[in-house]
Amino acid sequence: MSFQALPGFRDFYPDDLFIRNYVLSKWRDTVTRYGFVEYDAPPLEALELYTHKSGDEIVSQLFNFVDKGDRAVALRPEMTPSLARMAGARARDFKKPMKWFAVPQLFRYESPQKGRLREHFQLNCDIMGESGFGAEVEILALLVDTLRSFGLTENDFKVRFFSREFWRLFLTSSDIGLSIPVEGAPDPIAIALGIIDKMERRKPEDSRKDFGTIGLTDKHIELITQFASSGWLTEPLKDTLANDQMETLKAQYLEKLQAFPSIYPFIQLDGTIVRGLAYYTSTTFEAFEVNPKAGQTGEKFVGRAIAGGGRYDDLVQKISGTSLASIGFGMGDVVLGNMLKERNLFPARQSSVDVYVVILEETLRSSALGLVHTLRDQGVRVDYSFVSAKAGKQFEQAQERGASHAIIVAPDEWQKGQVKIKTLATRVEEIVSIQDIRSKL
Amino acid sequence: MSFQALPGFRDFYPDDLFIRNYVLSKWRDTVTRYGFVEYDAPPLEALELYTHKSGDEIVSQLFNFVDKGDRAVALRPEMTPSLARMAGARARDFKKPMKWFAVPQLFRYESPQKGRLREHFQLNCDIMGESGFGAEVEILALLVDTLRSFGLTENDFKVRFFSREFWRLFLTSSDIGLSIPVEGAPDPIAIALGIIDKMERRKPEDSRKDFGTIGLTDKHIELITQFASSGWLTEPLKDTLANDQMETLKAQYLEKLQAFPSIYPFIQLDGTIVRGLAYYTSTTFEAFEVNPKAGQTGEKFVGRAIAGGGRYDDLVQKISGTSLASIGFGMGDVVLGNMLKERNLFPARQSSVDVYVVILEETLRSSALGLVHTLRDQGVRVDYSFVSAKAGKQFEQAQERGASHAIIVAPDEWQKGQVKIKTLATRVEEIVSIQDIRSKL
């Protein structure tokens, strides 16, 4: 009998956890500078919280079950429904805009492809209670700076954004002719957005077939593809009002983003960005890796997706009954971790110990442990041998643990209130009185 | 439709998460000074990892289900089986002793009593690869110091310890007469330890009835009760060899603990401490609250249990096939949190912002955002208004967010490369040039 982690789940050995903690602490550090505060929700929630409003992509991939109290429950696949539940329930207790973040572990029953995990850690940042584009500017700046804090630059990533508003204006214009459905009927615009979201990753004929189900012809599809590829209209629509309105809006968005000079070089308007989640209402965006092989034959500019998000002005209302216009993003630890690894942007792991106390005689163990305790109380990371061992063996262990100094407790010196301190890198030894140890480290 | 957290699960609003982060960071801080390194395992594991060796107390309270790939799985109720799995699988990669810690969230389907949660966070510390009592000394010292780091003292908690070895010697002595069973048969010693573990919390007649099932009479039970209450034999056993051996062992244990002067005042030998988990082999221990009402009528000295652990020299072998003598403890965040709250030992929550940038004219927004960005890049926590707002409203928000300083970006000063800095507590204002801002905060 030998046990293993479940497929798609990671064991974090100390070297792995060092990396995970590095990523999580950088995340916390950057969002804290933006004035965000941290929250968390349970990893297990009522199933209906997800089936209710999150869209099919997630629901088909849940770890869900019925608990011993006959409740249908699920491991959280995303954080936003929990956030909407919590923020809505106590919205009046907090000044707006609320700037909240979390670093949950999330779970999806993905098909077990190579490298596809079933859990990951995700930074979630949300601004709630602000419907103006100022929140977009802040959240996009935060997204860019979070990635910049790891040493990633314009050569490594870009942020593409768009708005479902633009698509809605375009798809309902007389050139395309989709219409907003009556209550309860399937929404052709939502269906079209779902197809557009996946267009970049699928064969053109597959997308064409799906567009056919909502009555769109090749002529329509050509217009949609053109619009998606640039985000701008290459020819004026018949429906000039929608046309003008849309281009004006886009120009305004870009102008406002320009106001944050540090992020503007990272930002691109891109019509393909509509995102898979059903609850986004307007702005959607995605940070993606600039493919390091871009330019070579067959290699696209857009590499892996690093983070994504959007505005969801209705979700909190639908989940909690309280209206709260919101925007946010999620950034996972897996693609980001791979990017940092490939670019050698992870720091080397620190040693786990500063000082190793060498006990030369067992009769001095109690005295030595007193010293160990005093140093630890002063914030020094200290180790020592649990058993009687030869000095050589103890120095060996001091090296293994990465201690910078050994403190040698020996009978003669201890009697005079002294110890020997050895700097392990230089092998220089010095005799110091016990009360001076701290100043020598 | 309004959603809530599942019963027994906590929402962590920012105030709650501040407290949780305080507890977790103190934990990490103390164990790091002891030279421990952090690891983590998946929150979902194969069910059999727990049904295999952990004892009935846990197995009846699992959140378990069958996943979409037909695997029997469970949310982790404790960390030790995962640790045994991981450490056993790669034991040869690490120098011994291994000093590892984790801070997992754990899950139990407890019956929904008042205040009984179904999840908690738990500090887990383990020393693996050291069978000598030196590991006991280190782990008990760590337990004591972890609690001391929160400001708790000898008046707040004690640590009781014992060894199943002592009980095994006593229960198999001719005075009691239990015998080690043949392979496969129920183990009367394990059953007796289970009864002894619960004795303190049950009616004497209930324990007596259970002892009867393994053939123990009132005379035996009286001896067991005496032994449990003090941890020492009040009268010599018939079986003098076992008697001497046991008392010598205990004296040795206490002597070795005395070697760590800082922890000795916290330590008590106590025969009732055998702990519920089946896999403990010898030493078991428990940190408990000294009941603040002790001494009053009907009030016991022993309050709530804060942490518990023990030595499990066989578990890693049974789970992974690799032998690794180990000892460790777990400390939850709930009882500890309540104790700290009752004693006012939590710090006040810090503000979320250092500086609030007040934008006096919208034409200066881009310039102001450039300044916001520069300050954030320098590590300052900065906020500002996302929308055009009157100065008074902006100062109000600066106060609400707890900023210590407001930086006022106004047309006249900005033209001269200057801003006004206002210290919000004193209302003192000062005009400084932009490059000097950092030195004024």
Image: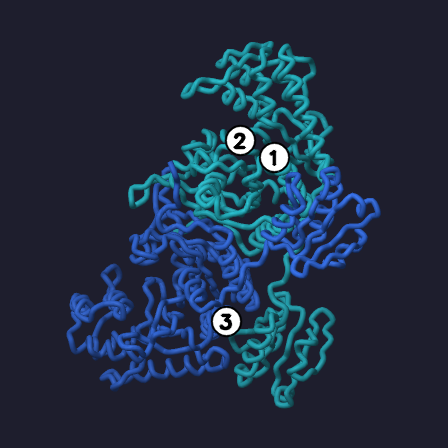
Chain colours: A cyan, B blue
Screen quadrant of the N terminus of chain B: top left
Q: Residue at x 84, y 47 (%)?
A: B416
Do callouts 1 and 3 mark residues in contact (Cβ within 8 Å)?
A: no
- Does residue A2 appear to the left or right of B368 in the view shown? left
Can you say whether A390 is above or below B41 in the image?
Answer: below
Across and down, in percent, residue A72 comes to: 34, 39
Can you say whether A413 is above or below A405 in the image?
Answer: below
Q: Which residue is mark 1?
A: A132
Across and down, in percent, residue A300 comes to: 67, 28
- Does residue B243 appear to the left or right of B367 in the view shown? left
Across and down, in percent, residue B213 comes to: 16, 65
Identify the element where label 2 is drawn.
loop
Q: Which residue is mark 3?
A: B151
Amino acid under disc 3: Gly
Across and down, in percent, residue B337 comes to: 44, 62
Q: Chain of mark 2?
A: A
Query: Of label 2 and label 1, which has the lower sequence position?
Result: 1
Amino acid under disc 2: Tyr
Between B188 and A318, the one lying in front of the other is A318
Same chain? Circles 1 and 3: no
Amino acid under disc 1: Gly
Q: Which mark is residue B347?
A: none
Can you say whether B244 is above or below A129 in the image?
Answer: below
Q: Chain of mark 3?
A: B
